[in-house]
Image (cartoon, rainbow, N blue to C red):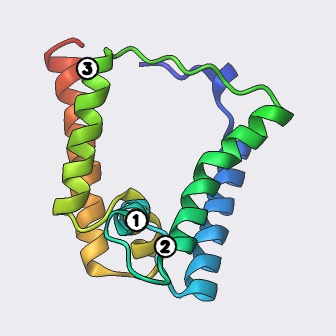
Amino acid sequence: MTIAWTEFTPWSALAGGVLIGIAAAMFVLLNGRIAGISGVIGGLFKPVTGDVAWRAAFVIGLIGAPLVYGMLAALPVPRIDASFGALIGAGLLVGVGTRYGSGCTSGHGVCGLARLSPRSLVATAAFMGAGFATVFVTRHMFGI
C-alpha cells in the first residue's frame, strides 16, 4: 500500500473536520438535538407534529450543499471499484447496522464521542473494528 502524495490534502481534511465539529456543536447547543444522520432521517419516516420541518431542512442541506459547491468549483470524480449490486448491499448492511447500533457514525463517532458517551465509545470501536476487519479480509484474504 502506498500513499498518493499528490492526492493527500491534510489542510482541506482538517478544515472539513473542524466544520463538521462546529456544525454538530451548534446543532446540539442551539437545537438540543444530536446530528446523527440515521436518527434525523429515521424521524422523517415516523413523523411527529412539529418535528418534520427541521429534519427536512437538515436533509435538504445535506443534499443541497454539495450541489451549491458544484456550481462554484469542480467536484472530484469518484473512483468506485465495486459493482452496483455490491454498493446496494453495502448500503443496506450499513442501514441495518445503524438500527442495531442505535445510531450511525455521525451520531456515535462525532457527537457521542464529543459528549464522552461510553455507549458511543463502544459503538464507534465496534464499527471501526468491523470496517478494519472487512478491508483486511477483502483485500488480503480474498484479493478483492
Instruction: Classify 107 as above or below 129.
Output: below
> Looking at the picture, which amino acid does disc 1 mark?
Leu
Q: Mark 1 highlights which residue? A: 44
Q: Quadrant of residue 42?
A: bottom left
Which of the pair 133/70 is nearer the observer?
70
Label 1 element class:
helix
Distance from label 1 to label 3 (Cα)?
Answer: 26 Å
Whichever of labels 3 and 2 marks the residue nearer the N terminus, that label is: 2
Label 2 element class:
helix
Q: Position of residue 36 (x, y in %)?
A: 43, 66
Instruction: Classify 93 as above or below 78.
Output: below
Estimate how packed mark 3 is, as few (under 14), some (14 to 19) or many (20 or more) residues with alpha carbons within 10 Å.
few
The dot on residue 52 is 2
Q: Position of residue 99 (x, y in %)?
A: 21, 60
> Looking at the picture, which amino acid does disc 3 mark?
Gly
* The C terminus, quarter of image: top left
Q: Mark 3 highlights which residue? A: 85
Q: Position of residue 120 (x, y in %)?
A: 30, 72
Q: Would residue 132 appear left or right of 81 to someone viewing this image?
A: left
Q: Position of residue 94 (x, y in %)?
A: 26, 45
